[in-house]
Amino acid sequence: MVGRKEREELRLRKQALILESGMNRRLLQTEWRELQSATAWLGEVRRLGQRARTWLPFLAPLAGFLALRGRKQSAPLANRTGSLLRWIEIALSIWKGVAAHAKRDQA
């Protein structure tokens, strides 16, 4: 049988473990709150990215046009027209892809 002294030691050890567990639980809660506040901006970035996704088909061709406009080209009008038609083709393919993706999201 376990003596009185051993039971008292076990009781004290149990109390110490209960107190330590409570401290660890509070520490974990504090660290979790800090982690949530530190990563709160990620949700906002995700929402911004989702909103920007609808504008990308419009902004991408515009950015390409502005990039080409900045270059000095001495090409004849036919080359410029061909380049413009290629950009329109690219913009249309992007538009179709985004429209198809939006339809799948809605379905």
Image (cartoon, rainbow, N blue to C red):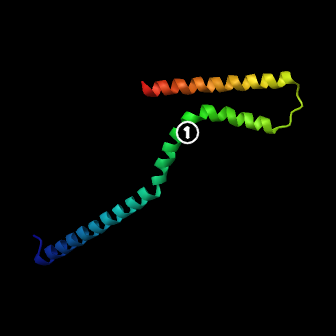
Is 103 positioned to the left or the right of 89 in the image?
Answer: left
Residue 22, image x, y percentages:
27, 67
State the residue at coordinates (82%, 37%).
71
Residue 105, image x, y percentages:
45, 28
How many neighbours does mark 1 have within 10 angstroms: few (below 14), some (14-19), or many (20 or more)?
few
Is 31 above or below relative to 8? above
Residue 72 appears in which quarter of the rendering?
Answer: top right
Q: How many marks?
A: 1
State the residue at coordinates (30%, 63%).
25
Is 92 above or below relative to 56? above
- As drawn, the residue found furthest toward the bottom would be 5
Amino acid at the residue labelled 1 = Ala
Pick the quarter of the image with the N terminus. bottom left
27 and 94: which one is in front? Answer: 94
Residue 45, image x, y percentages:
51, 47
Residue 79 appears in which quarter of the rendering?
Answer: top right
Pick the quarter of the image with the C terminus. top left
29 and 18: which one is in front? Answer: 29
Q: Mark 1 highlights which residue?
A: 52
Q: Secondary structure at mark 1?
A: helix
Residue 92 appears in which quarter of the rendering?
Answer: top right
Is 63 positioned to the left or the right of 97 in the image?
Answer: right
Is 34 above or below relative to 44? below
State the residue at coordinates (88%, 25%).
76
Is 69 above or below relative to 24? above
